[in-house]
Amino acid sequence: MTPQEFIAYEARLLDEARYDDWLTLFAADGRYWVPLKGAAQAEGEPHNALADEDHLLLSLRVQRLKNPKAHSQHPRSRSQHVLQVSQQLKGDAYSCELHTPFLYIESRGSRQLLLAGSATHRLVRAGDAWRIRLKRVDLLDAGEPLPAIQLFP
């Protein structure tokens, strides 16, 4: 699977609510990060984030989403990722970095949330498969008041 195909596959797993399968795409030291200041926030800069989750925190969030007693999931949230073509910024056979602009729609009951932004994926090889070391999501309106985001843009 090419890195670009991997990014599309990741989005499909999220849209199909296959969160356990999605979680396996992360390296053991993987991180999911949504900086509060978006693209203006440098990596390593001490600042709050909308999400900054290592593998353990991602596992806990997936468990919460699957829990039938999770109040925030009545009715269930659904998502649709609309991706532009991923551009490979750098890489070799063992690691790469991709930039992917997207539109993200999250639906819950009759309400829809539309977010635009771009994702940066740092992928590493684990055997014959790619794994996510970092998924950085820079929202276009980062820093502005946002409603609760239940899933994963």
Image (cartoon, rainbow, N blue to C red):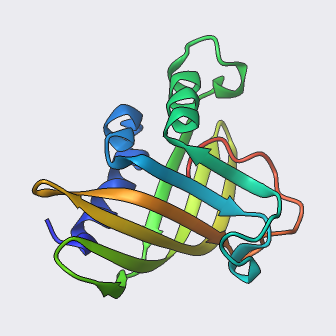
How many numbered callouts?
0
Q: Which quadrant of the structure image shows residue 9?
A: bottom left
- Return the x and y of residue 93 as percentages of the image width and height: 16, 76
Viewer-nearest residue: 149 or 111: 149
Residue 75: x, y in percent? 63, 26
Residue shown at 56%/50% (left/top)?
A: 152
Residue 122 left/right relative to 70: left
- Residue extending farthest to the top is 69
Looking at the picture, how far across and down is residue 150, in whole percent? Answer: 66, 41
The image quadrant where one finds the C terminus is: bottom right
Q: Determine whether 65 is above or below 17 in the image.
A: above
Q: Quick one: 11 or 112, which is closer to the camera?
A: 11
Residue drawn at the location 51% of the way across and 49% of the way down: 79
Classify residue 149 as left or right of residue 60. right
Q: Which residue is drawn at 80% across and 65% down?
A: 46
Above/below status of 39 relative to 67: below
Measuring from the top left, give residue 115's x and y in whole percent.
Answer: 66, 66
Q: Residue at x 45, y 80 (%)?
A: 99
